[in-house]
Image (cartoon, helix red, strand yellow):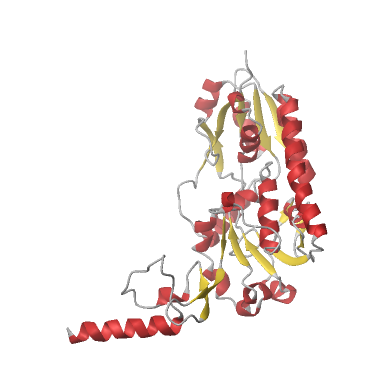
């Protein structure tokens, strides 16, 4: 009889799928991209809280010693798993092993509980082996890791071949307040040809004063709030763009500010290699081409465009652009392109006058 496993963290679910072992998966969390039954739930799922509100909720729950997550005990009893994968990295992002064990203890048949505690990038790869070995499919992990190594080796070789300079970057794990990046992300950055001197390799991300970021002055800024996709991050980017000194950052002046899907960085699965490839493009766009698979995973905040009327160059923002503050009296024609601020203003004024005459 095949083993039945439950994953209490998206990273384990992702790696099980990545290794082609989903047949062993019988229960997952509410955040997992899977059609398997959702065993782990959250008290705040389905809500559209701002980053500031989430920070407050998390802080209050920690002070009270309460978890934001819970186990559907009835469903877990019904599944009766042989193995449960849990985590001991961050009780903020996922249910911790200590809370999960309270529900597991009530099971009639006690499963094997395997906590995954990655700190660095190699730990994540080791976790893949741990998962596959527990499922009796260790070879699946080694086959996947061999493929991933070829991809990271290609990045390293390409950087060396082109004598690519090390880029001074920052990856943000939260917007309000601003958090730096930690754990395995600095190692992703290094393999992509960058260095983040504000990061905390192998440790937790922490609140980082804005003044410190301005002094550091990153050449490339990647905004990837934990748990947010690109569209969600774009809704709050103005909390950064309105800060004093924003327009003076080298990353802003170089049009090198990116919004990225946090799953490629904050979720410690083997898909972190996708994140490395995406970072390599963001750090060195003249060496690496954007992959089609990242089309919805990354968005450049500022891009250079040419006015369809006067051909003047201007900067367009993919989130909260300057044109959104002007009267919305004409539909945009994506095929024709945008107008520069001066031309768009003239066109709007002429349409307003024409409407007044009528």
- Between 31 and 43, the residue placed more toward the observer is 31
Pinpoint residue 353: horizontal percent, then vertical percent. Answer: 26, 86
Task: Please determine whether, in this image, residue 160 is positioned above or below residue 325.
Answer: above
The quadrant of the image that shows the N terminus is top right
Determine if residue 213 is in view: yes
Q: What residue appears at the point 61 percent right and 79 percent down from the top-left corner? A: 247
Task: Please determine whether, in this image, residue 339 is positioned above or below residue 187.
Answer: below
Determine if residue 118 is in view: no
Q: Residue furthest top?
A: 1
Q: Residue furthest left?
A: 358
Pinpoint residue 214: horizontal percent, then vertical percent. Answer: 69, 75
Q: What residue appears at the point 74 percent right and 53 percent down from the top-left corner? A: 188
Q: What residue appears at the point 54 percent right and 22 percent down from the top-left corner? A: 79
* Quarter where residue 310 is shown: bottom left
Pinpoint residue 91: horizontal percent, then vertical percent. Answer: 65, 45
Task: Please determine whether, in this image, residue 261 is positioned above or below residue 125.
Answer: below
Number of numbered discs visible in the structure rendering: 0
The quadrant of the image that shows the C terminus is bottom left
Q: What residue appears at the point 61 percent right and 24 percent down from the top-left corner? A: 24
Task: Please determine whether, in this image, residue 117 is positioned above or below residue 340.
Answer: above
- Between 169 and 91, the residue placed more toward the observer is 169
* Quarter where residue 71 is shown: top right
Pinpoint residue 222: horizontal percent, then vertical percent. Answer: 64, 62
């Amino acid at each position: 009889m095949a083993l039945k496993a439950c994953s209490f963290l998206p990273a384990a679910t992702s790696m099980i799928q990545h290794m082609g072992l989903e047949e062993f998966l019988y229960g997952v969390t509410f955040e997992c991209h899977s059609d398997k039954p959702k065993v782990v739930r959250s008290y705040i799922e389905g809500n559209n809280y701002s980053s500031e509100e989430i920070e407050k909720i998390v802080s209050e729950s920690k002070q009270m010693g309460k978890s934001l997550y819970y186990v559907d005990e009835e469903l877990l009893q019904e599944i009766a798993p042989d193995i449960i994968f849990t985590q001991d990295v961050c009780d903020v992002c996922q249910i911790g092993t200590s809370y999960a064990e309270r529900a597991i203890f009530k099971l009639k048949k006690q499963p094997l509980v395997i906590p995954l505690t990655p700190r660095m990038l190699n730990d994540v790869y080791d976790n893949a082996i741990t998962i596959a070995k527990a499922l009796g499919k260790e070879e699946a992990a080694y086959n996947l890791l061999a493929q991933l190594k070829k991809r990271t080796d290609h990045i390293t070789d390409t950087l060396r071949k082109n004598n690519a300079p090390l880029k001074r970057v920052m990856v943000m794990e939260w917007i309000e307040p601003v958090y730096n990046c930690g754990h395995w992300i600095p190692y992703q950055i290094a393999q992509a040809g960058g260095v983040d001197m504000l990061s905390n390799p192998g440790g937790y991300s922490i609140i980082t004063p804005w003044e410190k970021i301005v002094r550091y002055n990153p050449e490339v800024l990647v905004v990837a709030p934990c748990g947010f996709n690109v569209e969600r991050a774009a809704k709050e980017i103005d909390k950064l763009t309105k800060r004093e000194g924003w327009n003076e950052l080298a990353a802003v002046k170089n049009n090198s500010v990116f919004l990225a899907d946090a799953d490629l960085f904050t979720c410690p699965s083997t898909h972190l290699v996708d994140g490395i490839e995406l970072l390599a493009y963001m750090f060195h766009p003249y060496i690496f081409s954007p992959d089609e698979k990242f089309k919805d995973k990354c968005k450049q905040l500022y891009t250079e465009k040419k006015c369809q009327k006067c051909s003047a160059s201007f900067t367009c923002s993919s989130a909260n652009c300057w044109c959104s503050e002007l009267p919305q009296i004409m539909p945009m024609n994506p095929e024709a392109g945008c107008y520069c601020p001066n031309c768009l203003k003239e066109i709007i004024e002429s349409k307003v006058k024409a409407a007044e005459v009528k």
